[in-house]
DNA sequence: ATATTTTTTTAGACTAATCTAAACTTTTAT
DNA sequence: ATAAAAGTTTAGATTAGTCTAAAAAAATAT
């Protein structure tokens, strides 16, 4: 069984590697985990000995099939808990991250299956991120940054790329939410900002940076 | 802020001291926590330095007002989570303890207040134990062991004294639950066992030991 | 191509929580 | 009242996770 800390490292490696596809460097891990490279090297050796990652000295790590599976279960728990907090306890989507970071480490298969059932088997969390099923399978929906869209097509907001609390609060304030309908009214050449219409009733300008962080389907 | 381990020691001391009223010995703590006396001595010093317990060498510890308050918050969380597991996730009352032991350490005041509200401010957990309110206040209901009762009075089962999974499973099997109406039909002189009627429809014999572990109001 | 910079690893130390074994108190039993 | 037993504390070691500082390897820049 993995420790709290091992689970956190594995999850970070999973995310940094784009769901396990590419190698991750020691310093990248240290940065996202707010630790020092030396600590990362130590933990990397531990995870490598458990066959959760493949480690080549000085060349970073790649997650193994087994490691990916473990990471997916942590991600699953995190996202189910976030969904619970928002849908059942009326948390707002910018308040759930830190609590879910703790809840994701509770060890009980029964608990997580019952929670999944209680929530009626959700497929995405409050930020639009997919929830792996009990076998670890993810149903990905092809999404593009809103900043890459153009024309008058009907666009639906599917997820946020990086959901910092302040970005999420800003989105709520301007009326953007997961599932919202938007259309692009104008693109400002100068700074890449967009004028968009939300739910056919509200016009707002959003920065290029914000548009890059909103993932949509056309 | 208290560590996971400090919270567990404090909770154990709270329970062993009858909610803080009497002193507790090192070996008692070691026994219930499945550790060695030497480890307990170390932790006792830590908690004492934080003014959560009063420690006199060789004479055990007494919980302080501050320590009692901290312990009550852990107990509150534990019992709210147990209630959640049973009422919302359909756990049975013999399955909840170990998971609640983990959940009780999640740090978030907001979470626990929202959970309390979601559960509609329950006053007792699935085993009939009182749930401290957010200020730590407990509404105790005077209860006596069923083994101390006699006569044909209407008796209501209020709580289990020690709720081991096997005892709880046994109770479910014979139809005893928190809130059940029972009446005493006969007391066997030989071994102290009782013949009782549950909900005016089911007659069973229960051992003296079982009757001592069922707390009721007459 | 070699020197400089950056990144990574190693070595050694620290903290929290645990343990065993030995020393020390207190309790109990004669 | 004192010896034996029981309980408690201290001393010293261990493990997981962390750190700093130094050494080593890789990347980069002239």
Image (spheres, coloured by chain):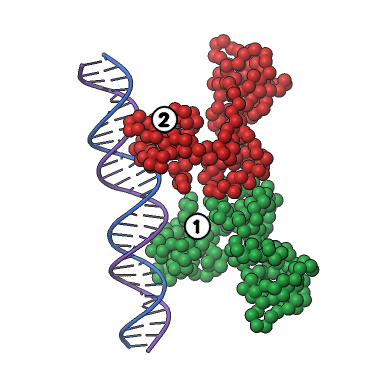
Chain colours: A green, B red, C blue, D purple
In which chain is the residue bearing label 1?
A
Quadrant of res B45: top left
Is residue A155 among what the camera can see?
A: no
Q: Which of A192 and B184 is in front in this view?
A: A192
> Residue under circle 1?
A8
Q: Is residue A39 above or below residue B140?
A: below
Q: Which residue is drawn at 33% across and 31% down?
A: B58
Is residue B216 among what the camera can see?
A: yes
Residue C12 located left or right of residue B126: left
Q: Do labels 2 and 1 share a chain?
A: no
Q: Which residue is drawn at 57% across and 52% down?
A: A99
Quadrant of res A126: bottom right
Which residue, as the protein is rendered here, is positioned at the far right? A200
Q: Nearer the viewer, residue A86 or A21?
A: A86
Q: Which of A210 and B98 is in front in this view?
A: A210
- Quarter the C terminus of chain A occupies: bottom right
Q: Residue D14 location in percent, x, y?
A: 33, 48
Residue A41 located left or right of residue A162: left
In which chain is the residue bearing label 2?
B
Residue A178 has which mark?
none
Q: In this view, does B170 lie above or below B47?
A: above
Q: Is mark 2 on a helix, strand or loop?
A: loop
Q: Which of marks 2 and 1 is in front?
A: 2
Q: Residue A36 location in percent, x, y?
A: 41, 64
Q: Which of A130 and A127 is in front in this view?
A: A127
Q: Residue at x 67, y 77 (%)?
A: A193
Residue B24 has which mark?
2
Label 2 to label 1: alpha-carbon separation: 38 Å
Residue D21 located left or right of residue A145: left
Q: Which residue is drawn at 54% across and 31% down?
A: B164
């Amino acid at each position: 069984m993995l420790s709290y800390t091992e689970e956190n490292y594995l999850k970070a490696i999973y995310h940094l590697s784009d769901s396990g596809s590419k190698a991750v460097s020691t310093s990248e891990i240290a940065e996202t985990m707010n630790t020092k490279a030396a600590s990362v090297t130590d933990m990397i050796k531990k995870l490598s000995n458990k066959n959760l990652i493949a480690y080549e000295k000085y060349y970073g790590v790649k997650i193994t099939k087994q490691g990916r599976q473990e990471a997916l279960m942590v991600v699953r728990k995190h996202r189910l808990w976030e969904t619970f907090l928002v849908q059942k306890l009326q948390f707002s989507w910018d308040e759930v991250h830190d609590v879910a970071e703790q809840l994701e480490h509770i060890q009980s298969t029964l608990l997580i299956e019952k929670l999944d059932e209680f929530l009626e088997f959700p497929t995405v969390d409050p930020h639009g991120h997919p929830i792996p099923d009990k076998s670890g399978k993810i149903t990905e929906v092809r999404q593009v940054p809103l900043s890459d869209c153009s024309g008058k097509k009907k666009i639906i907001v599917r997820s946020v790329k990086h959901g910092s609390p302040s970005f999420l609060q800003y989105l709520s304030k301007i009326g953007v939410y997961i599932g919202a309908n938007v259309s692009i009214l104008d693109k400002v050449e100068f700074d890449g900002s967009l004028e968009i219409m939300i739910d056919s009733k509200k016009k707002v300008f959003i920065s290029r940076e914000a548009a890059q962080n909103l993932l949509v389907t056309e």
